[in-house]
Amino acid sequence: MSLKPLALFVKHDGMSSRASITCQYKCGNACAHDVPNDSPGEYFGDIVRGAVTRRGVLRGGAAAVLAVGAGSVLAACSDGTATAAPGSLDTGSLGSGSASGSAAAGTNFTPVAPNKVDALTVPTGYEQSVVIRWGDPLFADAPAFDFDNQTAASAEKQFGFNNDFAGLLPIEGRPHAYLLVVNHEYSTEPFMFRGYDKENPTAEQVRIGWANHGLSVVEVQGEAGSGRLTPKFGSYNRRITALTEFTVTGPAAGSALLKTSADPTGTLVKGTLNNCSGGLTPWGTVLSGEENFNQYFAGAARVTDPTAAAHLKRYGVEGDASERKWERVDPRFDVVAEPNEVHRFGWVVEVNPWDASSTPVKHTALGRFKHEAATIHVTSDGTVVAYSGDDERFDYMYKFVSSRKMQPGNSQAAMRHNMTLLDAGTLYVAKLTGDAPDAIDGSGALPPSGVFAGKGEWIPLLRTGDDGRGESLVAGMSADEVAVFTRLAGDKVGATKMDRPEDFEPNPKTGKVYVALTNNTKRGEEGKAPADTANPRNNNKNGQVLEIDDQHAGTSFTWNLLLVCGDPATADTYFGGFDKSQVSPISCPDNLAFDPHGNLWISTDGNALKSNDGLFSVVLEGERRGETKQFLTVPIGAETCGPIVDEKRVVVCVQHPGETDGASIESPSSHWPDGGAAQPRPSVVAVWKSGGGRIGL
């Protein structure tokens, strides 16, 4: 497959609201490449109506009680429209979203208007502060950050680059103290090093890039009367990087497909890459999704075996040299030198943040694809269900149902048991049907029923026993192959092609499950899947949010679209039936979270409406269902990630600030968060109500 020519600071033919450099370094320029999924699949209109039936009702409630953030990146490039220049926003019909009547609990704030300001903008009556920035030290012996004198040894002890997912875990017995756990999705070397030569990076620059990937665990101290969080040098602090050792568990552990010259056992992997969103488990660990891992690997153009080449193509591994040229420093990143190294990425990883010496795990029973995240629902009988989306145009939605029950409590024995819950059970992929498929014409017009709705089933792909051995449930594929080439298994069973399923979040109050479908401008193109009831627009620039009423441990569900995003003044948008003249415009939903009142909060990435990305509240129940209000916007060139919304604070990760076309280290478009002449730095921010009141009340 030939690659389209890239230019660092040139727009992508008006297709993306992201800067070209963000597309290159975040997702390997996925939106400019051919769609990896060219399987015939099944369209809604091809599926016999009535074949999927509702066989049960929602069971149980979520047991998670931790403050959970669902940060993420969009790991494929945003398919939006070109943005206006900074400071020249033409809002057109974009309103502020002010509605009459009493606001739903948790959403009583004055919406922030769309803008292109180089600042984090919050509602009147709210305050903010930076929690931690790229390069801030995590350990007492770590040096202060020096932009012009970075080293790999320093970076391994400092907060990493491009923070995405964020989670807060209360530290028992210490008032207002938490562990802040954050993913570091990717590195943008041209914005990290002066005089960076993208064709000839130095070995030290490569190693600094490795150190800036992974995760950070840092103790933070809150204070009474505000939502401010201050980092501390604590015993839990930890950096996980592209060099940290991981244990492989599940059906692919020890498989010939995972064995390399450095690891002939196929059970120990060096590092984790492109960690996008994630989730906190009810047993106190962190799950993180490895997303656009494909872009780190070179040599696909030199692979001659047709089967291996097809597998690489299905996962988006293309071309000869990689963007970062890591293969020049470590040959494991060359698929010709090490054909199986690429198979060791694309997993859900689990980290125990309470033990800084513990070895993190890669769970192969959950399948290998571009995991945006993995999030947990626990049924009333203790069955654990993990949901995950494959963030690629026309790829699939998955869930894993454990055959083991969660053990309550925080004893070491319970933790050891619960960290095996994702190693035994059944992996499923989703197939959806629409209630009125013939009414969908690609325009986004509502069906006669007034709602986008339908039914679905979870098709089993892989069963893993208590002994760790897998059983393939897909004809013509072994258990190892289903685990490692999960996308191909989904192709074979006719899973529904979705518009980039990113974050997947169960509502802890109702048990309903929500999916952010970010966008897909290829929908409806010749040779591509046409619009359907769950993906109702061709050339879908703005995305939608799916609501699923799932059996959780069962195989049937019903669904509807909560939001069809975009400018509410246009005919192709839908806000849960709420008055569209009274909502904030929203585009490209990415990460999801819930507040204590059961409202959904959405962060965006790649806003196609000519304004900065932001964070939005959405009412889910009652007469105000669908009311959408913008709570904050992030600075120029940034995306909003990792939202956490609790009683006293909102936490967001501000990723890649200042990444705009034409910007550079010599001529930055942003100086956030430090101001003056400072270089922009990805950072975590806390927002709270002045005087210490409750968020949205």
Image: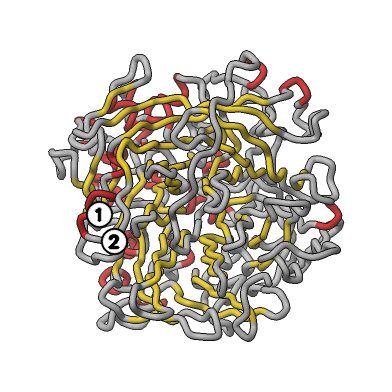
Please identify the quadrant where the C terminus is shown.
bottom right
Residue type (three-letter) at the residue carrying disc 1: Ala
The image quadrant of residue 594 is bottom right
Q: In the drawing, does residue 591 fall left or right of residue 291?
A: right
Tag 1 residue: 414
Residue 103 in the image: above or below residue 416? below
Q: Are marks 1 and 2 in contact (CB under 8 Å)?
A: yes
The residue located at (86%, 54%) in the rendering is 581
Picture coordinates of residue 63, whole percent (x, y):
44, 53
User: Quick check: can you spot residue 82?
Assistant: no
User: Helix, strand, or loop for circle 2?
Assistant: loop
Tag 2 residue: 410
The residue located at (24%, 46%) in the rendering is 331
Picture coordinates of residue 71, whole percent (x, y):
50, 57
Residue closer to the observer: 226 or 341: 226
Q: In the drawing, does residue 565 fall left or right of residue 139?
A: right
Q: Which mark, by number, is residue 36?
A: none
Residue closer to the observer: 671 or 569: 569
The residue located at (20%, 64%) in the rendering is 357
Residue closer to the observer: 223 or 673: 223
Categorize mark 1 by other alpha carbons within 10 Å: few (<14), some (14-19), many (20+). some
The image quadrant of residue 313 is top left
Picture coordinates of residue 587, whole percent (x, y):
69, 51
- The colour mode here is secondary structure
Residue 682 in the image: above or below residue 470? below
